[in-house]
């Protein structure tokens, strides 16, 4: 009887669980678009291609002996929108981590990019990671689509600044996870939904019950 009940529970949990899908090269890059911003990043909210965008400007803030790059003037689509954060490779990007203030977000203030911290790169080849959380059409919270993009800023070796104006970026790689609780930055690995963990737990419990029954 116990095995029958357990089997039903496993089936129900399996029906509730859909394997997450992680796709690469999902972020599109454009420049000088409306509203007038230096950079536009567009992501897919579904595999079918419903889109939402994030716009921002890039600025050089010069200090003695250093060149700080800042992201400012943030704008997002007024659909389901998207939330963007400065992250590092290997970060586990989930709603729980966002709620714990684990990442630097864009809440209206200009944010400096620490290349040595956010990517381990230097001004000779500066790059950084952004992660985003958005939602499927018609769904706002909690966020259920997660992704990241690795950006690099081309530089020059002459002039007072190593950055050639106007400032620009290029995408090195990107990925988006659908049907998951999050994504690991810099990888194609999704964070499993809680229901998938339940399936695994049920399986282990089933093995134990089977052994005791035998």
Image: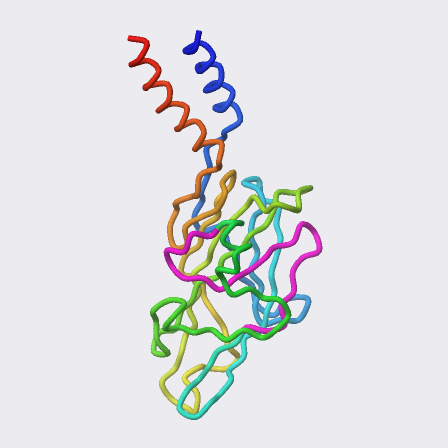
Residue 99, image x and y in percent?
Answer: 55, 54
Q: Is residue 92 left or right of residue 36?
A: left
* Quadrant of the drawing holding the N terminus: top left
* Quadrant of the drawing holding the C terminus: top left
Dominant secondary structure (helix, strand or loop) of the stretch shown in magenta: strand
Q: Residue at x 51, y 41 (%)?
A: 178
Q: Is residue 208 left or right of residue 140?
A: left
Q: Nearer the viewer, residue 174 or 130?
A: 130
Magenta segment: 71-93
Does 72 lie within the magenta span?
Answer: yes
Q: Is residue 61 above or below residue 139?
A: below
Q: Nearer the viewer, residue 131 or 51?
A: 131
The colour mode here is: rainbow
Q: Nearer the viewer, residue 89 or 48?
A: 89
Residue 38, image x and y in percent?
Answer: 58, 72
Q: Is residue 187 above or below residue 170?
A: above
Q: Residue at x 37, y 55 (%)?
A: 90
Residue 158, image x and y in percent?
Answer: 38, 89
Residue 104, image x and y in percent?
Answer: 51, 65
Q: Residue at x 59, y 69 (%)?
A: 56
**Residue furthest toward the front?**
212
Does 112 lie within the magenta span?
Answer: no
Q: Is residue 57 above or below residue 44?
A: below
Quadrant location of residue 125? bottom left
Q: Residue at x 42, y 67 (%)?
A: 128
Q: How many marks?
A: 0
């Amino acid at each position: 009887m116990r095995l029958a009940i357990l089997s039903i529970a496993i089936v129900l949990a399996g029906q509730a669980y859909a394997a997450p899908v992680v796709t690469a090269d999902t972020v599109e890059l454009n420049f000088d678009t409306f509203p007038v911003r230096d950079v536009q990043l567009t992501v897919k909210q579904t595999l079918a291609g419903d889109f939402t965008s994030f716009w921002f400007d890039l600025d050089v803030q010069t200090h003695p002996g250093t060149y700080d790059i800042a992201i400012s003037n943030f704008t997002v689509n007024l659909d389901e929108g998207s939330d963007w954060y400065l992250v590092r490779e290997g970060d586990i990007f989930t709603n729980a981590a966002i709620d714990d203030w684990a990442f630097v977000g864009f809440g209206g203030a200009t944010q400096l990019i620490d290349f040595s911290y956010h990517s381990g790169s230097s001004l000779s080849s500066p790059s950084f990671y952004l992660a985003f959380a958005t939602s499927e059409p018609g769904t706002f919270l909690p966020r259920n689509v997660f992704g990241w993009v690795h950006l690099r800023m081309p530089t020059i070796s002459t002039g007072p600044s190593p950055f050639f104006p106007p400032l620009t970026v290029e995408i090195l790689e990107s990925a988006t996870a659908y049907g998951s609780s999050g994504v690991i930055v810099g990888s194609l690995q999704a964070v499993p939904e809680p229901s998938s963990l339940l399936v695994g737990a049920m399986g282990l419990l089933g093995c134990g019950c089977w052994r005791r029954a035998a």
